Amino acid sequence: MSQNHWLANAIRIIEADYNRSADTHLIKLDMPAFPDIDIYLKDESTHPTGSLKHRLARSLFLYALCNGWIKEGMPIIEASSGSTAISEAYFARLLGLPFIAVVPVGTAPKKMAQISFYGGQCYQVAATDLCQAAADMAKEMNGHFMDQFTYAERATDWRGNNNIAESIFTQMNVERFSKPSWIVVSAGTGGTSATIGRYLRHQQWWQQPSQLCVVDPENSVFYDYYQSGDASLTIQQGSRIEGIGRPRVEPSFEAAVIDKMLKVEDNESLAAAHFLSAKLGRLVGGSTGTNFVGVLALAEEMQQRGEQGSIVTLICDGGDRYQESYFDHDWLREKGYEVPERVASMQSIYG
């Protein structure tokens, strides 16, 4: 098969997979504590690979293919805390390509099992060595390092074409407050926040402005970079909320498109994940908890100012992947988290 024919077929396979997939649901959350503020959850856990990263993996593959970076039979290597690697392993299998995920030590076992399920291999390193190890491996194997942390913000068409921002606004069209006051996301690569932030600015010439709030967990430099503008910031410990937060400022993180950032304690993230899981009747991941802490903070601010409106955030992935960690009470106690106490406090405040 010629390279051009292989490339055309590879793109067709990815587009066919997209056409077989419905859009993700937008869930309206019942929150009696905020009668004049409607809260919505864009449920990205319903993608075929179970997370928000399915959109990113599709975009990264198409971007790399159309740039001529991926050839037939070429190994694909990615640095990932799990969810991106799961989704990329899925697309690599569709195209018949070997896939290796370079993951941080301590990645949830169920995530690594899912990477293996799609035919991928896992290689564990320290969180601070992730990208360099993946780049070195790609060079040694004559493969392609997908490099989500560099290319996430440019691989997705932020103007529309059914990206996540356009999908949110389409689904919100006939709601009570159809133009969200805030969209709240967390950042791993920064690709989602860049896509949404750019889309909001592109749309503001004709409609009521919406604002973007990015929430950042402990052991991440994004919030500090947003405050200081110092892109050289680094720390030596990785985020304990899998999938978000970084020990360095990644090229895909675009601070200029963000209207507000909030720093969220890990205890609060995990308590919010437990609280929201009880509200929904199913488990959500830790990064979704981080998002929800931001939603509650903004809703309280709006309520204090007497404002009405809506807030939209994301269910990044399901909590089933974290049953041996975030939803294991023995694990939480061992790590020193105070989740039950904080969940009880949230229940008393928000119902």
Image (cartoon, grey):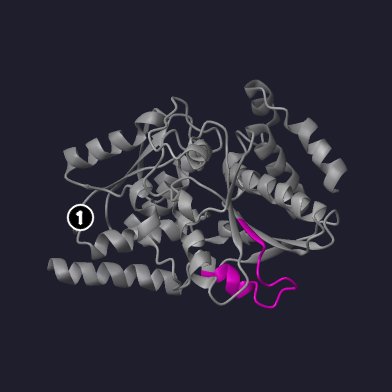
Residue 103 counted in the magenta span = no
The answer to which image quadrant residue 24 occupies is bottom right
Q: Residue furthest left?
A: 2
Q: Quadrant of residue 338?
A: top right
Q: How many marks?
A: 1
Residue at x-position 33% and y-position 37%: 131
> Per the image, is 177 magenta?
yes
- Residue at x 46% of width, y 56% of height: 194
* Res. 305 in view: yes
Q: Which residues are magenta?
A: 166-183
Observer-nearest of 219 and 79: 219
Q: Is residue 22 something that shows in the picture?
A: no
Q: What residue is shown at x 36% (from left), y 60% (from top)?
A: 155
SS for dot 1: loop
What amino acid is found at the position of numbered circle 1 in the picture? Gly
Q: Is residue 315 left or right of 95 when viewed as pictured?
A: right
Q: Is residue 137 above or below residue 3?
A: above
Quarter of the rendering occupied by the N terminus: bottom left
In the displayed structure image, the side of residue 168 where residue 301 appears, left or right: right
Pick the residue in front: 180 or 209: 209
Rendered location of residue 138, percent (x, y): 23, 42
Q: Which residue is mark 1?
A: 73
What crowding class fits label 1: few (fewer than 14 Cα within 10 Å), some (14-19), or many (20 or more)?
A: few
